[in-house]
Image (cartoon, rainbow, N blue to C red):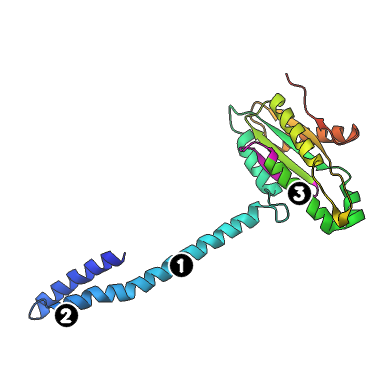
Amino acid sequence: MTGVSVVISVMATVVFMATFSAGVDMPGLIVSIVMPIGLGGPMILAFAIGTERMRYANQQLHRLATIDGLTEVLNRRAFASAVEKYCTAPHRRGVLLVIDADHFKAVNDRFGHDQGDEALKLIAQRLSRTIPRDGLVGRLGGEEFGIYLPGMDLASAEEVAGAVRRAIAEIDFRPENTQCPLSVSIGGASHAKPIIFRTLYREADERLYSAKQSGRDCVALPQAA
């Protein structure tokens, strides 16, 4: 932009001096080159800084709108929206897992909500590390999380769910230097044709309830066809 300004300034100076004065001289050309650089450079720099600040602010707003502030995974709205795009598209399959921390109220009651928050952070970190790279993780609310596995069949999803359950059980959570085991119950639902998120979630949540009724710290998935 500065270069273009210099070229235009030089051309305008040449025309002006050739028309209204004795002709082009060196001081006039120097001024026509220096002025755009002296004025345009700082203006362009200020514009670039303002644009970068706006881009950063938009990134922060997007993050606030999509990321759960405590656990650093997708919030419920962003997770549901992302999953909906996958599971309503034709010719796609996938599995939704709903994960709930077992006896979590007891953790809050015994050690306080600040330690409960630490437990949720640890659980979210393990979920993110355990699932495949193309999987989605979100916090659905409280101590409940969701995982969506695009393109995955039930057999593979069962392996992932088992790995998640074991990964959570291996967390060394010691609030106030007291060993506090963590575990999760997992319910799942699969689809091989378009389906809305609410329907898929309802089915997975029903199986989560079955897992809770079966003694917790277990996985409940539909039977493979």
Q: What element carries label 2?
A: helix
Visible residue check, residue 139:
no
Callout 1, which amino acid? Ile
Is 216 positioned to the left or the right of 202 in the image? right
Image quadrant containing the N terminus: bottom left
Q: Where is residue 220 in the image (x, y as percent from the top left)?
A: 81, 30
Query: Quadrant of residue 4 in the image?
Result: bottom left
Q: Earlier in the sequence, mark 1 or mark 2?
A: 2
- Asked whether the beta carbons under mark 3 and mark 2 sit within 8 Å of each other, the answer is no
Is 194 positioned to the left or the right of 21 in the image? right
Q: Name the residue under label 1.
A: 49
Give the Cα distance between marks 1 and 3. Answer: 38 Å
Give the Cα distance between marks 3 and 2. Answer: 69 Å
Q: Name the residue under label 2.
A: 27
Q: Nearer the viewer, mark 1 or mark 3?
A: 3
Q: Is mark 3 on a helix, strand or loop?
A: helix
| In the image, residue 131 lies in the stretch drawn in magenta | yes
| In the image, residue 2 lies in the stretch drawn in magenta | no
Callout 2, which amino acid? Pro
The stretch of residues the image draws in magenta is 130-143
- Rendered image: mark on residue 122: 3
Residue in the image at 70% along x and 45% along y: 138
Give the Cα distance between marks 1 and 2. Answer: 33 Å
